[in-house]
Image: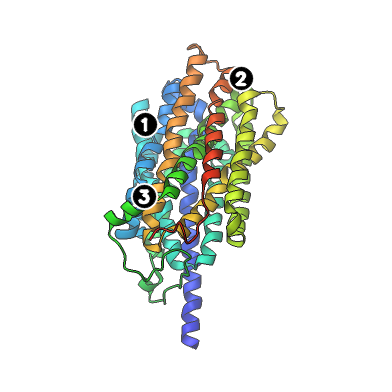
């Protein structure tokens, strides 16, 4: 008994070390994802691009990220999460270096594709690792925490990045990001393992409310068929597409230019305001993870409420651009960050109950296609609207931003409707 207790304690220590490294990796995912926001005007000037082309440049990250979500799940389930994360982060580091040295928009777009491709293979494999090192009760809270760490990555891409670019320039900052990304890849390779059994520890018992892990596992084709036939899967895909499209449209790219051009903020001032989005994300990730674990029967109500509040917040820049006093923009950003990040924690917990453990990598990867397709489409769409309204003069008015951000309102409405149609996990809608 003493030896078994010692092994369990050692396993717990290793589990939290692995969790810490996965959090560091996910922080860099968000850092890379949102880095163009604060430095957007510098990039547009240095690379000689308009709003439309710059929207395409920034969104180039999202297309490979979205397309790789299914392979990410398959690789996590088959090749192994550790190998997947390590190799992909090496590619992301290389893409960051190429982006720093880019002299033309084409090279910058190719570099962003490399970065998006590289970091795309982090989140799904990370969740796969967590399902093997932690119990089901721990999983919901830790998923919320790792999403909150994404909020910390958002913060690093705001105020700290703004000051870093003043010190190193935007090119030097992306070199620094590439170095950090490569360091994390090395640490993951040497310290992370996919399962406790690989280190000689006993496996973690995972009581599931969905199909039992002891049932015979289906093949990849059978799993895909079961997932794609699930109505809950398609509702969640639609919800994620529009919900995340709003977030990436503002926080992922156009929030910084909006604050600098409409409110006349400096780059550090805009970074400070946008950093409150990160604070909202961190708070919501931690709170919603706990609520998900404690009140699983209330998840749908919480998702509907959060999505409705996000849509309500979007009325300010859409209908009243520039009218909110500048000193209140950090408060608005705090609420936007909270409500835009509160629901995904609950959704991922619902997935874990609807689908069996053997499908977690694949179904998470499929679901994760939707938010990044939303970001990939909304960022250039807003850019083209802004460019059309500026009449080629390069000066973008508050009215032009309002017209561009107006797309958030129907997107939010569709997301609310989809959330209302969601069904809570239960015996009648589990995938078996």
Q: Give the x, y percent position of residue 280.
A: 63, 45
Q: Are marks 2 and 3 in contact (CB under 8 Å)?
A: no
Describe residue 399's horizontal placement relative to residue 190 as left or right.
right
Q: Is residue 118 above or below residue 36?
A: below
- Mark 2 or 1, nearer chain start: 1
- Mark 2 or 3, nearer chain start: 3
Q: Residue at x 56, y 44 (%)?
A: 420
* SS for callout 2: helix
Q: Is residue 148 visible?
A: yes
Q: Are marks 2 and 1 in contact (CB under 8 Å)?
A: no
* SS for callout 1: helix
Crowd rating for badge 2 (residues with CA inside 10 Å; few <14, some 14–19, many 20+): some
Q: CA distance from mark 2 to mark 1?
A: 28 Å
- Mark 3 or 1, nearer chain start: 1
Describe residue 160's horizontal placement relative to residue 14 as left or right.
right
Q: Residue at x 50, y 82 (%)?
A: 5
Q: Which residue in the structure is indicated by mark 3? A: 229
Q: Residue at x 31, y 65 (%)?
A: 217
Crowd rating for badge 3 (residues with CA inside 10 Å; few <14, some 14–19, many 20+): few
Q: Give the x, y percent position of residue 403.
A: 56, 20
Q: Is residue 143 above or below residue 275?
A: below
Q: CA distance from mark 3 to mark 1?
A: 36 Å
Name the mark on residue 109: 1
Q: Residue furthest front?
A: 428
Name the mark on residue 398: 2
């Amino acid at each position: 008994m003493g030896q078994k207790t010692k092994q369990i304690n050692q396993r717990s220590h290793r589990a939290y070390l692995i969790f810490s490294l996965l959090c560091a990796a996910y922080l860099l995912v968000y850092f890379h994802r949102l880095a163009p926001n604060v430095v957007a005007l510098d990039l547009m000037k240095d690379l000689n691009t308009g709003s439309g082309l710059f929207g395409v440049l920034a969104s180039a990250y999202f297309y490979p990220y979205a397309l790789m979500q299914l392979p990410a799940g398959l690789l996590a389930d088959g090749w192994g999460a550790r190998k997947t994360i390590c190799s992909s982060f090496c590619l992301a580091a290389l893409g960051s270096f190429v982006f720093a040295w880019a002299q033309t928009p084409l090279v910058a777009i190719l570099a962003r594709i490399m970065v998006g491709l590289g970091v795309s293979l982090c989140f799904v494999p990370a969740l796969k690792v967590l399902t093997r090192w932690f119990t089901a009760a721990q999983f919901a809270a830790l998923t919320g925490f790792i999403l909150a760490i994404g909020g910390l990555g958002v913060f690093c891409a705001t105020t700290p990045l703004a000051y870093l670019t003043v010190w190193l320039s935007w090119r030097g900052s992306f070199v620094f990001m590439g170095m950090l990304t490569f360091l994390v890849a090395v640490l993951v390779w040497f310290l992370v393992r996919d399962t406790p059994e690989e280190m000689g520890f006993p496996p973690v018992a995972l009581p599931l409310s969905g199909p039992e892990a002891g049932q015979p596992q289906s093949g990849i084709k059978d799993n895909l068929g079961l997932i794609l036939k699930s109505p809950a899967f398609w509702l969640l895909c639609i919800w994620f597409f529009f919900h995340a499209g709003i977030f990436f449209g503002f926080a992922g790219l156009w929030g910084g230019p909006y604050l600098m051009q409409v409110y006349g903020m400096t780059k550090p001032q805009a970074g400070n305001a946008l950093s409150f989005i990160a604070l909202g994300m961190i708070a919501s990730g931690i709170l919603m993870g706990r609520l998900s674990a404690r009140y699983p029967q209330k998840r749908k109500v919480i998702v509907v409420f959060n999505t409705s509040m996000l849509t309500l917040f979007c009325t300010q820049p859409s209908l009243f651009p520039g009218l909110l006093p500048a000193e209140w923009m950090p408060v608005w950003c705090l609420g936007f960050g909270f409500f835009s990040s509160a629901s995904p924690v609950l959704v991922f917990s619902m997935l874990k109950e609807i689908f069996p453990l053997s499908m977690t990598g694949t179904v998470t990867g499929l679901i994760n296609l939707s938010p990044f397709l939303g970001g990939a489409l909304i960022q250039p769409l807003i850019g083209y609207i802004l460019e059309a309204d500026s009449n080629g003069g390069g000066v973008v008015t508050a009215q032009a931003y309002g017209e561009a951000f107006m797309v958030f309102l129907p997107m939010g409405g569709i997301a609310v409707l989809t959330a209302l149609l969601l069904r809570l996990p239960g015996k009648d809608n589990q995938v078996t």
